[in-house]
Amino acid sequence: MNASVLRLPVSALALVLPLSASASLAFTISRATAGADEALLKALPSSKHTLAEGIQQASKGSESAISAKFEVEDGKLSLSVYTAGKGLGVAAEHNVLQEYAGSPEAAAWKPEVEVFKDVEHVARSAEQLTLMSLGSTSLADFVKKAEKDHPGTVYSVTPVLRDRKAAVVVLVAEKDKSTELVYDLASGAPVKAVEAGAPKK
């Protein structure tokens, strides 16, 4: 992370202020394969590249990955990585928020690059940039943690706000099942494991 002072816009501060350093985060496990998720899980084995490889390829120099996922678009498998072109130390309004996306089914991943200009994608990527700038664990390292914690193929990693706390959600596919792992963004560690639908204690 850039050692310079991080300047956050007012919109980003609205994300930061509610965060509580001592609150616990659930490390949740959910298993559901309906609709689009089912189609995605069936398509994943055709990929010749891992999510970690996509993140590594898109992260060049100061450019930092802020989320990544496999998805099915127009019936075809795609690997997508959102990045902050100027790194995590530059506020969203002065950064270059963009997406690398392309088919992972060829020997070489040759993504097209789109710089976000529409409100929806700018807002989403600006939030992801702000959240990732709060921790010291990179997106690639969260993927490595998930690969250690659960067998299967990591197919999505996204920083989110959950219960007003910063977290990173990692989705792992194993055969026809999907497992959701949630990590505390600040510490990089899971706190607790709860089966989806299980009563809370």
Image: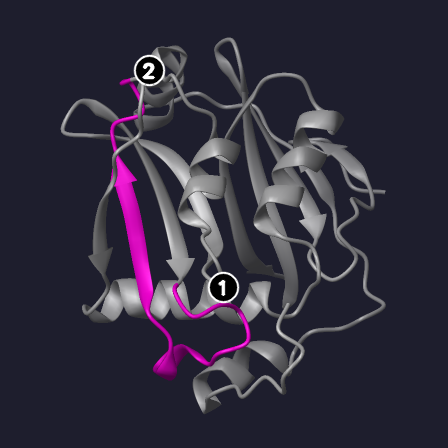
Dot 2 alpha-carbon crowd within 10 angstroms: few under 14, some 14 to 19, many 20 or more: some
- Tell which of 184 and 1 is nearer to you: 1
Q: Colour scheme of this structure image?
A: one colour
74 vs 113, left or right, is left
Q: Is residue 11 above or below residue 201?
A: below
Q: Residue at x 41, y 38 (%)?
A: 69
* Magenta range: 85-106
Instruction: Examine the image and state in which quarter residue 163 appears.
Output: bottom right
Q: Nearer the viewer, mark 1 or mark 2?
A: 1
- Residue at the (25%, 27%) spot, across then down: 103
- Mark 2 and mark 1 in contact (Cβ < 8 Å)? no
Q: Is residue 68 left or right of residue 171?
A: left
In the image, which disc is placed on residue 62? 1
Q: Amino acid at mark 2?
A: Ala
Number of numbered tags placed on the structure image = 2
Where 176 sits versus 30, above or below? above
Query: Which image quarter holds the C terminus?
Result: top right
Q: Is tag 1's residue or tag 2's residue first in the polypeptide sequence?
A: 2
Amino acid on which disc 1 is placed: Ser
Residue plotted at (69% across, 64% down): 135
Residue 102 drawn in magenta? yes
Marker disc for residue 43: 2
Give x and y (percent) for residue 27.
Answer: 73, 41
Asked whether 103 falls inside the magenta stretch, the response is yes
Residue 186, position as x, y percentages in the image: 74, 62
Q: Which of the image's four quarters has the N terminus?
A: bottom right
Residue neighbourhood size for the residue with mark 1, other residues' Cα within 10 Å, grouped as few (<14), some (14–19), many (≥20): some
Return the residue nearer the eye: 120 or 135: 135
Indicate the position of residue 23 as horizontal and vertical percent values: 81, 64
Q: What's the residue at 34%, 41% (across, down)?
A: 80
In the image, residue 74 lies at what x, y percent? 14, 29
